[in-house]
Amino acid sequence: MSQADQAAAGQEDTLAGLEDRIQRAVELVQQLRREKADLEKQLAATIRSLSEAQQAGESSTAQKAEITRLMLENEAMRKERDNVRRRVERLLETIDNMGTA
């Protein structure tokens, strides 16, 4: 084989190696793009979940406040009921006393 043939064969080997490396680089870039897209989807889903969790927490806080308000209102109504019951009992007692007097 002549030097020209050897040089041509060496260039072909070099070119084939370069093509091989370029192909691997292209495949790697494609894989990285797919992984990036998957990670972006996961990030968006995580952000949505976090937002929903925060809203649920706010809703829970609002529900707790409403429960507290209702409990206080219930207690006030019980006191009012007891007060009305005592007044009615006094009125009935007064009426009973009028009948015996």
Image (tube, rainbow, N blue to C red):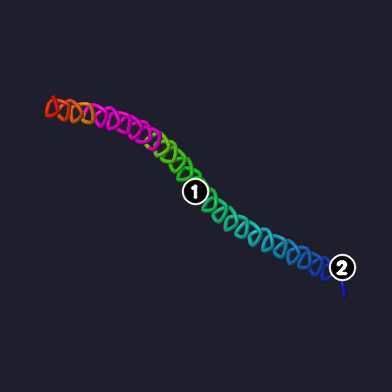
Look at mark 1 in the image and give the residue it sits on: 49
Mark 2–mark 1 Cα distance, whole angstroms, equals: 68 Å
Side of 79 relative to 8 (left or right)? left
For the residue labelled by badge 1, is the local secondary structure a helix, a strand or a loop?
helix
Q: Position of residue 68 (x, y in %)?
A: 40, 34
Q: How busy is the neighbourhood of tag 1: few (under 14 within 10 Å), some, or many (20 plus)?
A: few
For this view, does 34 lie left or right of residue 22? left
Task: Give the camera-side residue of 82 and 68.
Answer: 82
Camera-side residue of 59 and 14: 59
Question: Quick check: 64 above or below 100?
Answer: below
Taking the spot 44% from the left edge, 43% from the top edge, the residue there is 56
Front of the two marks 2 and 1: 1
Q: Is residue 93 magenta?
A: no
Q: Residue at x 35, y 35 (%)?
A: 70
Residue 81, magenta (yes or no):
yes
Give x and y (percent) for residue 17. 76, 64
Q: Residue furthest bottom?
A: 1
**SS for dot 2:** helix
The disc placed on residue 1 is none
Check disc 2 and report the residue beneath it.
Answer: 3
> Can you say which quadrant of the picture contains the C terminus?
top left
Circle 2 packing at 10 Å, graded few (<14), some (14-19), many (20+), is few
Within the image, what quadrant is residue 92 found in?
top left
Badges 2 and 1: C-beta atoms under 8 Å apart? Answer: no
For the residue pair 42 and 21, the one nearer the viewer reads as: 42
- Is the stretch drawn in magenta largely helix, strand or loop? helix
Q: Quadrant of the N terminus?
A: bottom right
Residue placed furthest toward the front = 101
Residue 71 x/y as whole percent: 38, 35
Q: Earlier in the sequence, mark 2 or mark 1?
A: 2
In the rendered view, would you say 91 is above or below 47?
above
Q: Which residues make up the magenta segment?
A: 67-87
